[in-house]
Image (spheres, rainbow, N blue to C red):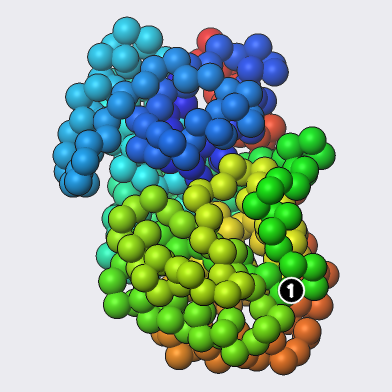
Amino acid sequence: MTVFGTRPEVIKVAPVIRQLESIGVETINVSSAQHRDLIQPLIEHFDLRIDHDLDVMRPNQTLSGTSARVLNTIDPILESERPDVVLVQGDTTTALVAAQAAWNRRCPVGHIEAGLRSGDATNPFPEEMNRRLISQLATFHFAATTRNQQTLLSEGIDRNQVFVTGNPVIDALHWTLQRPRDLQDNDQIDLQAIGQRIILLTTHRRESFGDSMRANLEVMADFVSEREDVSIVFPVHPNPAVRQAAEEILGNRPRIHLFEPLAYPEFVVWMKRAWMLVSDSGGLQEEAPSLGKPLLVLRKNTERPEAVDCGATRLTDGSATKLKEELTTHYLSNEWADQVRQLENPFGDGSAAERISSALLQHAARVS
């Protein structure tokens, strides 16, 4: 059984589900629908299905309320389906509660993207604590990198339970890039002027809300207004805190384009066309090196230091002033972009799903 509910989760579990099904493993797909509108196009793109929909979201929901609804709705499904393993991905509320529910049923948990740590239990919130707690519940830890593996070992996880697999987001990216029909231009892309330096912007994390996000958006607005060859493409997250700030600060400005959330193939097209990426996303830190795109991370820290160490990303330290400095430096010189185009992606080679499936099958063989 694989449990997911957000857009990043679907992108990262899709290659694993497809790989398991290709070798004859029976799969059960459970959606909490944390991001209902955002995940449906991904379900179609990756040709997946949803076997159980928990439908947990409510207006103005709290983290505790969402957690309670996931726990209450998934437990009867676990009782009736009796899966051999429950797979969760990353650090969402859905992932943590599904892992807890499986633990309560004495069902082994497999954690995809295990071993990420920012070093600050409150940042990102609540994701950092979610991923630490899942590590205490999991039987199988699928780490993207050797650094993630070492983190888990240092926390006392049995070496035999940790598997370095790469991150399946790279599998998903490669799979999408190999489907030209899915990557064709659409009307939104045709609106863009040829020759513009396009900044692809995303921001959605809770710790970015409020003054920090507004300051960053002000810097972005000023940067574009002062340079006629720069445009911003911003797929705006549906969270009201993000949408309100985006519309107030970036709305109705020349060369700044606010879009509804994009389907994943469309988003991949924008990544390919971008001059640079600016984001607080974790997934982009993993994808950007494969596309040779420099990424400014709108955060004080990152649980993906490999991206910083290899030179693909730079942190703004949560500072709007640092963001402005980095944008200006990159505008005046192509040195960083030239370096990034030569890098190998530290998060994998596109074979993570095969490695995860192999580890699960080895377990099945041992217990059969």
103 relative to 59 in the view: left or right: right
Q: Horizontal and vertical percent for residue 359? A: 60, 30
- Residue at image position (43%, 81%) is 218
Dividing the picture into quadrants, the one containing residue 48 is top right
Mark 1 neighbour class, 10 Å CA radius: few under 14, some 14 to 19, many 20 or more: some
Q: Horizontal and vertical percent for residue 142? A: 54, 42
109 relative to 71 in the view: left or right: right
Q: Is residue 204 above or below residue 26?
A: below
Q: Is residue 180 above or below residue 318?
A: above
Dividing the picture into quadrants, the one containing residue 294 is bottom right
Q: Is residue 214 visible?
A: yes
- Residue at image position (75%, 47%) is 185
Please state, as top left, top right, bottom left or bottom right, where the N terminus lies in the image. Answer: top left
Q: Nearer the viewer, residue 119 or 194?
A: 194
Residue pushed farthest top? 80
What residue would you read off at disc 1? 196
Q: Horizontal and vertical percent for residue 192? A: 71, 63
Q: Is residue 191 above or below residue 296?
A: above
Q: Horizontal and vertical percent for residue 313? A: 61, 73
Q: Is residue 317 above or below residue 170?
A: below
**SS at badge 1:** loop
- Residue at image position (51%, 61%) is 258
User: What amino acid is labelled 1 in the image?
Assistant: Gln
Q: Is residue 153 visible?
A: no
- Residue at image position (35%, 30%) is 32
287 relative to 237 in the view: left or right: right
Dividing the picture into quadrants, the one containing residue 73 is top left
316 relative to 241 in the view: left or right: right
Q: Nearer the viewer, residue 287 or 210?
A: 210
